[in-house]
Image (tube, rainbow, N blue to C red):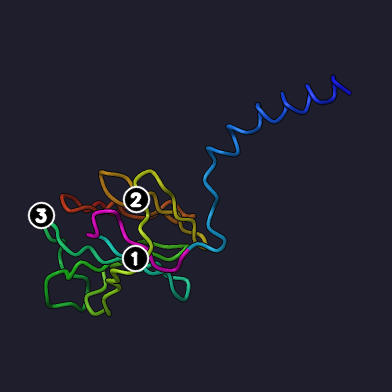
Amino acid sequence: MRRTASLSLVAALVVAPVVASGQQPFQPPPDAFQTPSGNIHCLFSAGTLRCDVLEHDHATPPPARGCSDPWPGHLALNAEGQVTLPCRATSVHNDEAFVLGYGARWLGQGITCDSEEAGLWCTNGAGHGFQASRTQLRLF
């Protein structure tokens, strides 16, 4: 009996740090999230992740085909294909959206986003995506 109790205690001590330090994944992930700075807001809807960069100091990308106005800060990413820069889109800015902390990951349907102090990195299964922050925008 004493040996069983000792083994249970050892097992509990070995497992406890792993359980205590593990962050529970979102089931399902929130549809809307924002970066801790509040500068980037995203919404996943109908298979598309749409994000708004509210303020930026980097060079504005050229207008997308069919757009005459400068880039308004909108990004769109599907599970496949390249990032698009919609010129006419409803803003997804939502101050009530979940805050995706630095070092956290959002996993959607075929899209992954990582929140880092250097910006938000989102990629799809085809390897396309973007890095967005106040100081840079990189599409790949």
Question: In this figure, what is the number of numbered marks?
Answer: 3
Reading the image, the residue beneath label 1 is: 42
Work out which residue is located at the far top of the displayed protein and give it: 3
Could you tell me if the residues under marks 3 and 2 are in contact, i.e. CB atoms within 8 Å?
no
Q: Position of residue 95 (x, y in %)?
A: 28, 68
Q: Which residues are magenta?
A: 30-39
Could you tell me if the residues under marks 2 and 1 are in contact, i.e. CB atoms within 8 Å?
no
Location of residue 40 by image quarter: bottom left
Q: Position of residue 75 (x, y in %)?
A: 29, 66
Q: Residue at x 77, y 28 (%)?
A: 8
Left or right, 107 with respect to 131, comes to right
Location of residue 60 by image quarter: bottom left
Above or below, comparing residue 47 to residue 126 in the picture:
below
Left or right, 27 with respect to 81, comes to right
Amino acid type, residue under disc 2 in the picture: Trp
Reading the image, the residue beneath label 3 is: 57
Q: CA distance from mark 2 to mark 1?
A: 12 Å
